[in-house]
Image: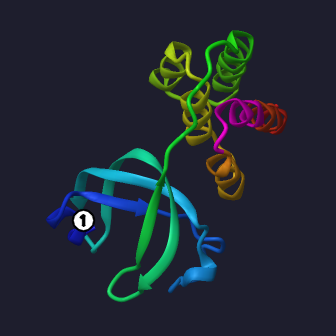
Amino acid sequence: LEAAMNRDQTIFLLTQKDMRVDDPRENDLYRIGTVSRVKQMLKLPGGGVRVLVEGIARGIASRFTSYDPYIEAYISQQDAPEEEPGYEALIRFARRLYEEYAELNPYMGMETVLEVISSDRPGYLADYIAQNSQMEYAVKQQVLEELDPVRRLNRVCTLLSEEMEILR
């Protein structure tokens, strides 16, 4: 984080396959992650850090080059396919599903629901819902790895329905 703050404030975020691994290597990390910009970094008492980031694009770690003092890798940015017009029914369904999910989840903020209701892009909607739902990290990783926006939104709707059954 400090190196990113001293440069262009851009970092690449990957999920570990097993969170219990203290010193992850290439095989311990998923390859597809998020190129992000650090918006705010706050050092906490006791050495902890709180970071606010904004996702910019999907990325793929093609080659890891260093692990000390932090992991470095070559990243290729993965541009999303053009979102085709249409799919209004799917978008309406996803919005309604997320509203129902928010009613079942007492920790859901109204601003999150408003963001979902105001979106009309399948890819953004899928990403936002997945990011703001209590799905397992491995499931969120599957969503991240699906590049087609319509397939991604369909997948998120299925996952959200399953999550709602658990909450009920």
The quarter of the picture where the C terminus appears is top right
Residue 149 is inside the magenta segment: yes
Residue 20 in view in this figure: no
The answer to which image quadrant residue 120 occupies is top right
Picture mark count = 1
Quadrant of the image containing the N terminus: bottom left
Residue 82, image x, y percentages: 56, 30
The relative height of residue 108 versus residue 73 in the rendered view (above or below) is: above
Q: Is residue 154 visible?
A: yes
Helix, strand or loop status at disc 1: helix
Q: List x then y, in percent, for residue 65.
A: 42, 84
Q: Mark 1 Cα within 10 Å, few/some/many (few <14, many 20+)?
A: few
Please say if 82 is above or below 23: above
At horizontal 49% and vertical 17% (from top left) the residue drawn is: 114
Q: Residue at x 55, y 14 (%)?
A: 117
Q: Which residue is mark 1?
A: 4
Please indicate whether residue 87 sits to the left or right of residue 14 in the image: right
At x 31% / y 69%, what residue is drawn? 48
Measured as percent of width and height from the top left, residue 108 is found at 55, 30
Which of the 4 quarters of the picture holds residue 29?
bottom right
Span highlighted in magenta in the image: 147-156
